Amino acid sequence: MTTTPPRTPTTPLPASRFCCLRQLTILAPVVMLAACSSVPLPPWTPTAAQPAASAPTVQRPSSPVAPPVAVQASPVSPAAPPAASTIQAEPSAPYSAAVAARFPAPSVVYNTPGLQAGRTTFTSQAEIQAWLREQVAAASRTPGIKAAVLPIGRSQRGETLEALILTRAAGTDPAVLQSAGKPTVLLIGQQHGDEPAGSEALLVVARELAQGLLQPVLERINVVIVPRGNPDGTAIDQRATTGGLDMNRDHLLLNTPEAQALARLTRDYNPTVVVDAHEYTVVGRYLQKFGTVQKFDALFQYATTANLPEFLTKAAEEWYRRPLMAALKGQNFSAEWYYTTSSDLADKKISMGGTQPDTGRNVNGLKNAISLLIETRGVGIGRLHIQRRVHTHVTAITSVLGSTAQRASELQQLRPYLDKEVSAKACNEEAIVEAAPTAAQYDLLMLDPVTGADKTVPIDWDSALALRSLKTRARPCGYWLSAASTVAIDRLRLHGVKVLRVAEQGSMLGDSYREVSRTSGERQDVRGAIADANAIIKVQVSLTRGVVDVPRGSYYVPLNQPMANLAIAALEPDTQSSYFANQLVRGLQSTVRVMAEPTVKLEELN
């Protein structure tokens, strides 16, 4: 029987079924799919306007939405915000009292270790580890729930990286969760050490899944939580890891042990949905460039890189972004697409999140997962508005969990459909080797730093919602790699890419790369910042078709597999994110684009 495409998500999700503090009703069953068939993906027929590729707008349903559950919070008496003239900004506030008045504390108070009254530091690594074990003990008291703390690796300074597994399957091993027939959601916090709200929010979510109001979603989904991906950076309030690398630009190359740990976890548990919780800069270069303060409680973006399946993006938009925006609005939070800008004060351009296949958001998209970035306003303001920032994350993540539970049946069919669609493209069609965002103009809302009033700033805007193809090539059947390419092979396998070994000497029809020009440079992120201190090789190539001798012990990476698009991102040499550019593959002659199904004997790697 062939894989059936999931029901086209032509309507937004209904209003959130989560209700008040004392009750959480189970989400309505999703509609069953039609019988299996071999028809192609049905055409996309939206019932509401799609977001414009060049000038995005936050879409919200016209009907009111019930607020999401506010989990395990101590209620405080709500009060109307005082007039700006009566508010005294905290001494550490980098803006006026009038701006601070735009972000009143929520009517709930969260009580993680790092959010206790009078606390000056956020939850420590030891406290996170103790918290996770408390949730395992609490979950074990509920019949049917299985929970475990899984060590997934160590940081560069030797800190243990851990994940909390919560499920109603028979156990917490990856194979058991896979056989349970439920989608798995992976939640990741604090890849950047100076962005604490996501980590604190994930501790709240972990508690509510283990012993609180979110427990019912475990009837339909599994959840894996990594509260803190970068403990070394957190210990010194630094964005990067100990080695100075931005681990959220390392998810294709996997040079850091922290990124390797997340890749291994993703490979083993194969999540259908991945959420990456971050915070963004509030003042800094925005005040310097535009004379404004950042306005939005939350910024959001899904995977936006070359070669993503169309249905994956559309499901992320209608099944996740729209209900998430409605949930935030229900809590009176403001939201916008994620955006950033460079530190060059003369550069007034604003860009959405990057299109390079290097961030967790984009790499997990290339693994055919619905991959979501959620950012709250937090970098550079310390503990200011921390309860509101955490509540924003909790609201957004609760929406994602609810959407996954509601769409569980469809998501279980979406993933195999996408895997088959990607695999079927081997030897056919074209693949995008390099893409870029689309330039546009946009009126962005910010805040006046003195009055706190909304201020519209017309800006040049790079939209990641519509990509420009800069370079395309015929999609090969696979890639041959030399026997010396063991580092690249190990990294691909850590991602879950299937790699075969040439068992007997033979030949393959392929396109070999020939160098046209070469320079050295630096790998940059969308902000113009250096993503890696190591120099990269910037090469221009031409292709030469011919029969290539392939010795025994060399490797073949077939593209008739779900991870094909990730392999393309890694192995086409003339991009800044490629394994060749970053010297994980030595020499252009080490890789060949195989253009016909090989007839040589191949064997599985152990």
Image (spheres, grey):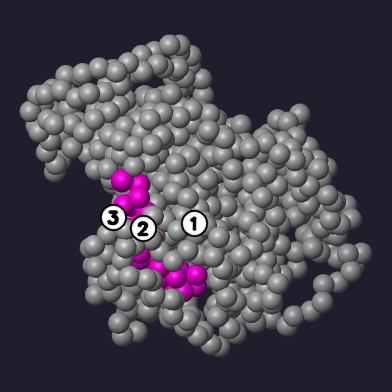
Amino acid on which the number 3 mark rests in the picture: Asp
Q: What numbered label is drawn on residue 43?
A: 1
Question: Which is more N-terminal, label 1 or label 3?
Answer: 1
Q: Is residue 70 above or below residue 223?
A: below
**In x, y percent, where is residue 278?**
56, 53
Looking at the rendered structure, the secondary structure element under dot 1 is: loop
- Amino acid marked by disc 2: Val
Q: Residue at x 13, y 31 (%)?
A: 599
Which sits earlier in the primary sequence, circle 3 or circle 2?
Answer: 2
For residue 541, side relative to residue 426 (left or right): right
Instruction: Quadrant for residue 93, please give it.
Output: bottom right
The mark found on residue 39 in the picture is: 2
Relative to 41, residue 203 above or below:
below
- Whether label 3 touches label 2, CB < 8 Å: no
What secondary structure predominates along the stretch shown in magenta?
Answer: helix
> Dot 3: what SS?
helix
Task: Pick whichever, 285 or 32, lies toward us.
Answer: 32
Coordinates of residue 326 in the picture (x, y in percent):
64, 69
Residue 207 versus residue 252: which sits nearer the camera? 252
